[in-house]
Image (cartoon, rainbow, N blue to C red):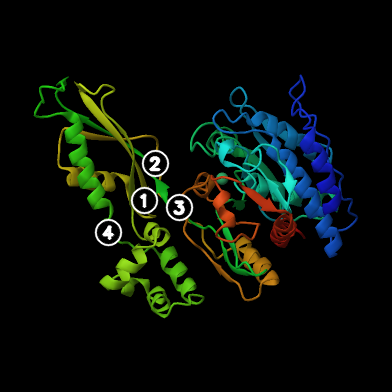
Amino acid sequence: MVLSILAATACAGRRVPPLAGPSSAPVMETPARVALITAPRSDAEWNALGDEAAALLSQYLRINTTNPPGNEIVAARWLASLLRREGIEARIFEPAPGKANLYARLAGDGSARPLILLNHMDVVLASPEYWTVDPFSGVIKDGFVWGRGALDMKGEGIAQLMTMLILKRAHVPLKRDVIFLATADEEIGAGVGAAWFVEHHGDLIRDAEFLLNEGGTTRANGRGGVDYYGVGTTEKSPFWLDMTARGTAGHGSRPTPDNPVHRLVRALNRIADWAGRTPLVVTPAVERYFRDLSTIERDTAQRRWFADIRAALRDSVAVRSITGDIAYNALLRNTISITGLKGSDKTNVIPPVATAVLDVRLLPGQEPAAFLAELVRVVGDTGVAFRPQGPSWPATESSTDTELFRAVVAAAHARHPDALVTTPMLAGFTDSHYFRRMGVASYGIAPFPLTQSDSRGVHGNDERVSVEALRFGVRFYYDVVARVAAK
Ligand SMILES: [Zn+2]
């Protein structure tokens, strides 16, 4: 199967078919379907399904959904055509020209509440000059499917799609509905994607009990095994701020005492200094995560510190070492990154205002208003004002005491009995918070085992996923879903 896909794609690589015809319906030829009579059992069947997933992902990556503008409607139509030809009804919602959210549902007997498989169709910008392949070629070479979105998150979207197709093809009896929800505008953190869907069509998912989304980590050890499965149960909350300093404008040759650029720089200096000293806070999820890590940590000092992170944070040597790791640091405090600055456009003009933007991320349990008050106190200048860029929300968390969480653990241990299954808090954020706030237990899982270096393609260059990881991921995803949805 791999060989035939490689051959087919090599041809396609030379003569890429147009993505969309005049009707803007995708005209890509659909890859061969793996027929099923019962749920797949043999390795050969699973490998064939994994290879079908690779061929589908290759096509999906050729649909350029760089956001902005996203143009997710083309992706939605392509996904809908795949679902419909299997007899799965799919609805496309178009909140704005070129934008789309797709909703499909497999019916269960209603004895349990639905499970949502959530994925976003948009991707971030790719700079082709830094890639070794065309980021929108979807080329399959050296055993990898290459392209922007392979990991974030068209690959996982395809694993979810294959789960739907396998359930349907094999006529698997379901106790709960399984909903496939592909959305727009995740990467720009606003817009007409998941937030729009929840607001305008919340009735279609209101009864859901569970959701699976991006936001997990499956860490391969590079020797064919998996060290740990990280399941996303909580994430920090973004609190992005615009900052404005006002003062007296003038000519650069006659300095004004309250030059707003000077004022802004002084304020930013205080913020930059404070950013490294914001209070250390241990949330219950983070405490549990460090305790889990201590069981696999090889360094003896770290192992002792992680086992009791609260005690470790009273020891200055431990604090320096632990917060010296940027990933751990972000789990233990509210963080501030100054990311944008603007003063005058002209060298000889003192502007009336100078502005900066701050990327602030808050831990669960932290109030945005309280944080803002503290920031104002640190700056201590009434000529400097802060304004939140958009709505903020308190960070949310899903319980691990659920049937779905236990299913993820069981599916992980069925493959890697010794792997640690743990719950790292995400320092970034996904669309899960919209659903957690509706009471849907939402987990980030990663279907593809990746080493640290494999993950660099996310929002970076040469994003790719191996065909072997796809084979693993399709089977793993299906297993998790079947454990909670099949009768
Ligand atoms: Zn993503």
**Residue type for callout 1:** Leu
For the residues marked 4 and 2, what is the alpha-carbon distance in whole angstroms?
21 Å
**Residue type for callout 4:** Pro
Element type at marker 2? loop
Q: Position of residue 69 (x, y in %)?
A: 56, 28
For the residues marked 2 and 3, what is the alpha-carbon distance in whole angstroms?
12 Å
Crowd band around label 2 with a 10 angstrom C-alpha radius: few (<14), some (14–19), many (20+): some
Q: Which residue is mark 3?
A: 396
Q: Which residue is mark 1?
A: 362
Sequence-wise first label, 4 or 2: 4
Crowd band around label 1 with a 10 angstrom C-alpha radius: few (<14), some (14–19), many (20+): many
Q: Position of residue 239 (x, y in %)?
A: 37, 43
**Residue type for callout 2:** Ser
Q: Determine contact: label 1, label 2, CB under 8 Å.
A: yes
For the residues marked 1 and 2, what is the alpha-carbon distance in whole angstroms?
10 Å
Q: Nearer the viewer, residue 429 or 348?
A: 348
Q: Which residue is mark 2?
A: 392
Q: Nearer the viewer, residue 327 or 109?
A: 327
Which is closer to the viewer, label 1 or label 2? 1
Classify the position of ligand 1 by quadrant: top left, top right, bottom left or bottom right.
top right
Q: Which residue is mark 4?
A: 279
Q: Is residue 424 left or right of residue 11?
A: left
